[in-house]
Each structure stands twice: as structure tokens, then as C-alpha cells.
């Protein structure tokens, strides 16, 4: 067996007694035997078995290959396409390794093309040979409720009406979880979920890259360290009460419903050590848990994902800078999505976190030893100061910070007036009058007049700014 054949996501296929099942009847017997003896269903490859309608409820499933995304598998397409002469379109396919079948078919293509040129028959068609991606394995009406699933590979599966709900029961008019669905170290790469359910399930470290979820129920699901890179949530997929802890939402698409901001408990990009250890190390161990495994990640073209140059040095400031920039882009995208859907509170919060991550991006970049010219340094300083000003003014929606800033200005000038032989009460009253533009500065010197004019300008601006925030709160209270 080739080494690459052993690298099946989270599954270790090198252990002893690893079975490969090819018949549905064999799998049914294994499931019945596990239920009878109360044993886990483990260490097997069932990628060739039809799983339609099977019942995995309350089973412990470990180290099982349900399907693999074997890009190296060749599927030859002999379908008829328009002649290249007619269409004028250049087609570039991902050809498989050379073989006798490819040579024969290629020779046949050349003969057909020459005949079409000789007889000037532009309606002539030719066969084309191309390497197609492996077709998705259908998993239909399969019940995983209450199952404990770990170290599994579902890559490139098409789930239809599958149920991953936790088992619940009504006790004293309360819904109580009696058997929770636990999914840990699962590969859902390039999968498609249609009308599936994950209510109250818990998922820890899962690969959802390039996955599509259509009309699914994710209510009260908890996902820890999930990679949703370029995943798409379509149709009426619901997120009521879900929790995403340190997940990656880079380039994730929300077609209709969107996960709310309070459901996102930090992005994985905000935890630098976990981001490097889990998402870009083939072997990792989580310190505060018993999770220790190997994760071989492939991209959609079948190549093993390698670390980017800036991710190799786990202590480099430049890598931290770029990862924070990625987090900033995700939050900025979420802020725009929330605003378009009318969730203005969520939009404001996402905007604030986006600005914070952008601030850390420029801060780490400024501290790094990467060569920078003077213009680049000045641009970094300008961005840092811009964040400080935005933070001071409450990012346009935090009224408390504006009020505190107004009090600080009034208090600062009151302290100056107190030093001019005025009582504290008189000093505060005078400073407050100056801040709203009704103070009399005729008895002040030239420099003092300029200073108190600045207080008036700042005070009036802050009052108007606070009125803007209050008006937005009255209108955008979602």
C-alpha cells in the first residue's frame, strides 16, 4: 500500500485488524454484533458500502472511513462535446496519469479532429477524454442520533435527510438531552448536506471546507475548532442558539440566514497557537484535552496542504500580523452581512472587532523585522492612530465612551479653573458652560480664550455625536 493511501484524513489505516467491507450485509452484521456485545464500530473502511437507510443510533463509531475524496481516482468521460473548431473554446482538463486507455482515446480524438477539418464539417463532433473528480457518495436517510463519532472520514459525501440530532426526552414538561451526539475529529471535506439535522450536537475539530449545507437545522449545535473555509449555507438553514467556538469562517457564504454575532465565540485566527497547531500541522495535540491525532488535509485538487511561508515560524510577528488581517476581513464581511439583514447591533460589534484585529495587524507588522520604507511606517502609524480615535469615540455606537470623554474634557478644564482661585463648584459650572458654548470668556487671556474655544468646539461636537448615536439606537435597535 502506498504511503499516500494511508493518509486518510483523521483515520489511521495502518493499525492491525483494519477491515475493508464491500457488502452491505457485512456492515449490517457488524452493526448488529456491536449492539449485541456493546462494542464500538471501529477500524474499518466502508466507503464501498451502500449506507442508505442504515441505523447508527447510539453507537460508538471510531476510526472509520465512510468515504474518501480520492482525487487520484480516474474517471474517464467519453461524453460528446462540440468540436473545438466550431466552438473555438480551449478546454484544459486535469488529465490523469498516462496509460494505454488514454493513448488510444487521445489518438481517436486526433483522428476525429482531422476528419472534421478535411471534410469541413463544422457540425462534426469529437469525443474528449478528461479526468473528472470523483462523484459524491450518496448517504440517504441514515440515522446517527445519539452516536459518539470520532476519527472518521466522510469526505465528498452527499447527505440527504440524515439525522445527527442529540436524543432528547420530555421530563416534567422540560426537554432534556438523554444521549448527546458527539462528533470529534471528523472530515466533511467537499460534502453536501440537504435537509439534514444537527440539533444539540457537539462537534470538535471538523473539516467543513468547500461544504454546502442546504435547508439544514443547526439549532443549538456547538462546533469547536471547525474549518468552514469556502463553505456555503443555503436555503432555509437555521442557526438558532448555535455556538461556534474558535472556528474559521474565511470566505464562508451565508445565502439567507446568518449565524448571529453572539454565537461566534472568537475566530480560530484570534488564537494564534491553535490556528497553527490544528489547521496547519499534520500532527497536533491539544494541551487542555485528550485530543491527539494526525490530520492530513487536502485541497480540492487533491494535493496535501502545505504551510504557507509566513506560517512556518510560529513565533514570527509577521505571521501573527497576516493571520490577524484574515480575522479582520472575516469580521468586516460579517458586519456587512448583518447590516444588509437589519441586524445593526451585530453589525456594530463585528465592525469593532474587525477594527481591533486590523489594529493588531498593523501593530505586529510595525514591530516585525520586515523591511519597510518611511511611507509604509507612516501609513502604519496613521492606521494605529485611527483605531485609537475610533476607540475613543466608541466606534460610532458606544454612547458611554462619548459621555466619559465629554466628562474628561469638562473635568480637565475645571481643574485649570480651580487653580485660578475658584471653588470646585464654580470651576465645574464654568467649564460645563464653556463646553456647551454659553460661557463668558471676556475675562480670560488670549491663550486661555483659545483653549476654552477649543473646549466649546469639542463639547458641541461630542453632544451632536451623542445625539447621532442615540438616534441610531432608537432606529436600529436590533
Image: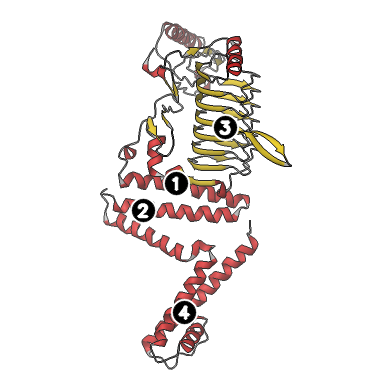
Earlier sequence position, callout 3 versus callout 4:
3
* Label 2 to label 1: alpha-carbon separation: 13 Å
Residue occupying image coordinates x 49% and y 49%: 331
Seen from the viewer's position, the closer of residues 204 and 77 is 204
* Nearest the eye: 383 or 115: 383
* Secondary element at tag 3: strand
List the residue tagged with mark 3. 212
* Measured Cα–Cα span from mark 3 to mark 2: 34 Å
Q: Which of marks 2 and 4 is nearer the N terminus?
A: 2
Residue 354 appears left or right of 53: left
User: Are there few (<14), some (14-19), or many (20+) residues within 10 Å of tag 3?
Assistant: many
Front tag of 3 and 4: 4
Name the residue carrying label 2: 362
Chain-order first, disc 3 or disc 2: 3
Residue at the image position 60 percent from the left and 15 percent from the top: 50
**Can you see residue 67?**
no
**Residue 464 image position (x, y, % from top left):** 55, 72
Q: Mark 4 points at which residue?
A: 410
Q: Where is residue 51 in the image (x, y as percent from the top left)?
A: 61, 17
Mark 2 neighbour density, 10 Å: few (under 14) some (14–19) many (20 or more): many
Q: What element carries label 2?
A: helix
N-terminal of the pair, mark 2 or mark 1, is 1
Q: Earlier in the sequence, mark 4 or mark 1?
A: 1
Amino acid at each position: 500500500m502506498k504511503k499516500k493511501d494511508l493518509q486518510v484524513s483523521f483515520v489511521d489505516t495502518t493499525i492491525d485488524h483494519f477491515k475493508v467491507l464491500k457488502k452491505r450485509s457485512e456492515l449490517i452484521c457488524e452493526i448488529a454484533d456491536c449492539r449485541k456485545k456493546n462494542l464500538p464500530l471501529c477500524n474499518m473502511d466502508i466507503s464501498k458500502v451502500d449506507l442508505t437507510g442504515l441505523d447508527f443510533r447510539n453507537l460508538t463509531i471510531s476510526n472509520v472511513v465512510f468515504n474518501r475524496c480520492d482525487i487520484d481516482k480516474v474517471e474517464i468521460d467519453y461524453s460528446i462535446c462540440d468540436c473545438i473548431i466550431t466552438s473555438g473554446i480551449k478546454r484544459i482538463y486535469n488529465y490523469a496519469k498516462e496509460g494505454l486507455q488514454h493513448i488510444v482515446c487521445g489518438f481517436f480524438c486526433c483522428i476525429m479532429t482531422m476528419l472534421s477539418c478535411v471534410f469541413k464539417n463544422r457540425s462534426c463532433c469529437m469525443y474528449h477524454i478528461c479526468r473528472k473528480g470523483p462523484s459524491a457518495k450518496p448517504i440517504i436517510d441514515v440515522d446517527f442520533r445519539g452516536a459518539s463519532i470520532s476519527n472518521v472520514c466522510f469526505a465528498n459525501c452527499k447527505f440527504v435527510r440524515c439525522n445527527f440530532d442529540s436524543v432528547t426526552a420530555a421530563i416534567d414538561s422540560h426537554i432534556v438531552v438523554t444521549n448527546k451526539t458527539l462528533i470529534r475529529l471528523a472530515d466533511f471535506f467537499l460534502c453536501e448536506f440537504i435537509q439534514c439535522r444537527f440539533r444539540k450536537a457537539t462537534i470538535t475539530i471538523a473539516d467543513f471546507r468547500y461544504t454546502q449545507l442546504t435547508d439544514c437545522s443547526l439549532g443549538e449545535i456547538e462546533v469547536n475548532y471547525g474549518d468552514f473555509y469556502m463553505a456555503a449555507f443555503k436555503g432555509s438553514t437555521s442557526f438558532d442558539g448555535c455556538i461556534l467556538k474558535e472556528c474559521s469562517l474565511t470566505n464562508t457564504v451565508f445565502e439567507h440566514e446568518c449565524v448571529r454575532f453572539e454565537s461566534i465565540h472568537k475566530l480560530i485566527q484570534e488564537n494564534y497557537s491553535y490556528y497553527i497547531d490544528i489547521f496547519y500541522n499534520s500532527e497536533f495535540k491539544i494541551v487542555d484535552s485528550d485530543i491527539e491525532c494526525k490530520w492530513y488535509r487536502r485541497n480540492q485538487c487533491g494535493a496535501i496542504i502545505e504551510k504557507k511561508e509566513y506560517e512556518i515560524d510560529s513565533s514570527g510577528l509577521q505571521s501573527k500580523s497576516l493571520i490577524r488581517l484574515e480575522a479582520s476581513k472575516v469580521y468586516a464581511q460579517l458586519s456587512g452581512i448583518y447590516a444588509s439583514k437589519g441586524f445593526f447591533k451585530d453589525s456594530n460589534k463585528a465592525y469593532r472587532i474587525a477594527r481591533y484585529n486590523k489594529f493588531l495587524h498593523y501593530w505586529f507588522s510595525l514591530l516585525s523585522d520586515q523591511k519597510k520604507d518611511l511611507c509604509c511606517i507612516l501609513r502604519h502609524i496613521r492606521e494605529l492612530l485611527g483605531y485609537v480615535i475610533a476607540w475613543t469615540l466608541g466606534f460610532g455606537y458606544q454612547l458611554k465612551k462619548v459621555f466619559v470623554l465629554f466628562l474628561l474634557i469638562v473635568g480637565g478644564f475645571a481643574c485649570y479653573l480651580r487653580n485660578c482661585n475658584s471653588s470646585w463648584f464654580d470651576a465645574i459650572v464654568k467649564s460645563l458652560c464653556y463646553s456647551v458654548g454659553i460661557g463668558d470668556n471676556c475675562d480670560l487671556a488670549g491663550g486661555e480664550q483659545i483653549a476654552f474655544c477649543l473646549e466649546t468646539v469639542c463639547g458641541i461636537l461630542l453632544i451632536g455625536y451623542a445625539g447621532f448615536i442615540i438616534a441610531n439606537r432608537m432606529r436600529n435597535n436590533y
